[in-house]
Image (spheres, helix red, strand yellow):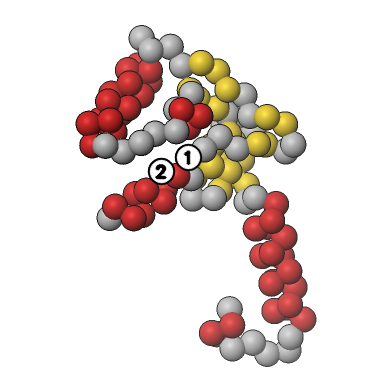
Amino acid sequence: MHAWLCHIYEDQALQQARGRKAAVVPLPKHSPMGVVLVRFQELMDDLGVPLAPKKTEGHSTVLSFLRIELDTEHMEARLPLGKKEAMLALMAALLAKEKVRVKKV
């Protein structure tokens, strides 16, 4: 459980959306989410889990979760460009074949 939790947590960094920097707004500590963030930081400190300050700055309109970019401003879910291109190339190679084994798919 610890390994996948750490993997998911590490993927929560702010991402860039379509070549522009994601909007980062300071999170007031007295707001409901600010209170949750402070409590989470205290819990991680008690457990001895280091937190990168850049990953706890506040909220953003774009969040990367399991390597999928979630954009709440545009209501979109996107794959990173490199992953999208790799998947399209793989699909093109499979479609070019007359037969494909299930293992290849």
Q: Residue furthest top?
A: 30
Residue 97's image quarter? bottom right
Is residue 16 toward the left or the right of residue 12 in the image? right
The CA span between labels 2 and 1 is: 5 Å
The image quadrant that residue 64 belongs to is top right
The percent coordinates of residue 16 (x first, y second) are 65, 36
Q: Position of residue 8 (x, y in %)?
A: 42, 48
* Above or below: residue 92 compared with residue 62: below
Q: How many neighbours does mark 2 have within 10 angstroms: few (below 14), some (14-19), or many (20 or more)? A: some
Extreme residue toward the right, this view: 96
Q: Is residue 66 above or below residue 37?
A: below
Q: Mark 2 near mark 1, Cβ–Cβ under 8 Å?
A: yes
Residue wearing tag 2: 9
Q: Is residue 21 toward the left or the right of residue 10 in the image? A: right
Mark 1 surroundings: few (<14), some (14-19) or many (≥20) residues within 10 A:
some
Q: Residue furthest left?
A: 46
Query: Which circle marks residue 12 in the picture?
Result: 1
Residue visible at 57% across and 29% down? 61
Q: Is residue 44 left or right of residue 67?
A: left
Q: Is residue 22 left or right of residue 7?
A: right
Residue 30 drawn at (x, y percent): 36, 9
Residue placed at 49% from the left, 50% from the top?
Answer: 66
Residue 17 visible to the viewer: yes
